[in-house]
Image: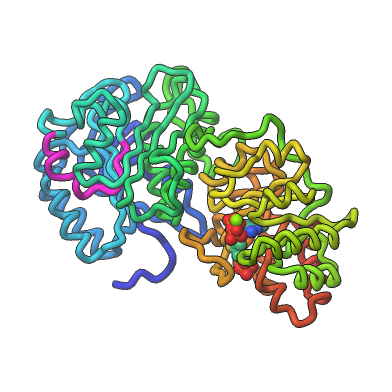
Amino acid sequence: MTQVNNTAVIWSIAGSDNSAGAGIQADLKTIQSFSTPEQPLHLCTLVTAITAQHSSGVDACMAVYVELLHLQAMALLKDAKPSVIKIGLLVNAAQVLWLADFLQQLRKSLPDLLVMYDPVAISSSGSTMAEPDLYQAVVQHLLPHIDLLTPNLQELEALTQSPDTEQAVKLLLNTGVKAVLVKGGHAEATLCTDLLFISENFRYLGYPAYTNYIRLSSTRQQHHFNHGTGCCLSSALAAALALGYALEDAFVVAKTYINQGLSQPVAITECSGTLGHWGFPAKPEYLPELLTDKLLPPAQAFAPLKAALVLYVIVPSVAELERALVAGVKTLQLRIKSTNPQQLRQQIQQAIQLCQHPDVQLFINDHWQLALELGAYGVHLGQEDINSANLAALQQAGLRLGVSSHGFYKLLRAQQLQPSYLAIGAIFATQTKEMTGKLQGLQKLARYPALFPDIPLVAIGGINESNAKAVLATGIRHLAVVQAFAQATDPKLWVQQMQQFITEAQHAY
Ligand SMILES: Cc1ncc(COP(=O)(O)OP(=O)(O)O)c(N)n1
Ligand SMILES: Cc1ncsc1CCOP(=O)(O)O
Ligand SMILES: [Mg+2]
């Protein structure tokens, strides 16, 4: 049967928690929370066990027979195939063996399938739900079929017999697992820190990280309403991956979701309850802190923009810069990719001269040394460039800084520098720049303004007069363009039209 719309189907293969804080019930609530009419998610379930539990323990756990697991899977396949499978509680070796075999078969017809395993065996209250032979079977048979494993610290040690996190993760990656997210929720610390290790084999990686792991941290929220937090973190990851987020971005989204849910829990009694499920997180205070990829930010923030970016036109030469100025563009970028050093200096100097006007803001792309030396208004740097640029010198000289980003993880990374603006791209397909990662699209773009309200955000990549209104409807207020301006036959009219779209959006939303 052909799937008819863009609904992403996720399967949860897990145990029932009748108290509905963890297990399949938590997965359903979490996945539903991420589902929207524009990008619907549909969670189907394969129940592996029925548990009798409450907030302080598990009274009973009964495994479902493998034959019935198989029938559940066959029934689901009659309707639709999943794009993501999230595995939770497995009880015994028989279930593991069936699942390993099933996944191997399924992958033959679903090469893009993403399989996650949250290796729960002991509940957060300390009750053991699995049989003693479970982990041995998991390591031997299941792990080679897992793309992303999400153990907590206890489960990590139980699976590997290693108390050393990095060593344990190495052991797991050697079994064929492609990424490991170690959940730090159970550690005794004021910060709750989770670590994501991504091997080169992980197909969903959008952009290479600058370290081989990413560490996200948030202040621990001490209360009694955290039953099922681990299940929900893994489900939120599954949802974000099904929505097309790159793994590192899905990690940020999932942790932000948990912070939101713990900030607004559902209390049932004074000492029992669960985290809340309140939709895609939308407040900056829920964002975690990125502890890895530490850049060396200057002591102070970069100078703010002297005016809003609004329409930001990027040009490859001084001749094009003049054309843009004549057409009425007030925010410009000189983006020269190849020329000899002498011409480069000359062009940057000329561009700075031409833009000496109180209403005009000119950013120099890439060539920060020349920009600094020649007294430019600002520079635009990519994520690689900020590793090596002398940011302190740029900040001290009063230059404005704009930084490229391609999703939540890169936004967090760039935000550390307190730049003057952040660019997000590519929104649509572009012929101007080779983009290796996923396109942002309008649905993802619409999530950023609420989470990054204190810094100007500019959208870039494939933007033109036909899609500008749709981009502005996401809440983004600034548009950067290359080709659409270069191809405008009447540049003045084109600029007026684009500026009008932006002004209308500012008043409309
Ligand atoms: C406004 C704006 N956004 C993004 C970019 C891209 O910068 P970067 O990632 O450094 O890539 P190059 O432009 O150097 O190819 C930009 N230039 N401007
Ligand atoms: C430089 C850059 N960075 C992200 S997309 C992009 C190219 C944008 O060009 P266009 O507006 O022609 O798609
Ligand atoms: Mg660059």
Residue 428 at what x, y percent from top left? Answer: 56, 66
Which residue lies at the image location 68% right of the left edge and 55% below the top edge?
Answer: 458
Say above or below: 354 vs 98. below
Q: How is the image coloured?
A: rainbow
Q: Write down which quadrant ligand 3 falls in.
A: bottom right
Which residue lies at the image location 54% right of the left edge and 49% below the top edge?
Answer: 384
When asked about the image quadrant of residue 304, the answer is top right
- In terms of secondary structure, what is the magenta stretch mainly? helix
Which residue lies at the image location 39% right of the left edge and 38% below the top edge?
Answer: 213
Say above or below: 142 vs 273. below
User: Residue 303 colored magenta?
Assistant: no
Q: Is residue 15 visible?
A: no
Q: Quadrant of the C terminus?
A: bottom right
Residue 339 at what x, y percent from top left? Answer: 64, 66
Residue 32 at what x, y percent from top left? Answer: 44, 48
Q: Nearer the viewer, residue 17 or 144?
A: 144
- Which residue in the rendered view is the most extreme toward the bottom? 489
Q: Is residue 140 left or right of residue 497?
A: left
Say above or below: 140 vs 208. above
Q: Quadrant of the N terminus?
A: bottom left
Q: Nearer the viewer, residue 463 or 119?
A: 463
Magenta part of the chain:
136-150
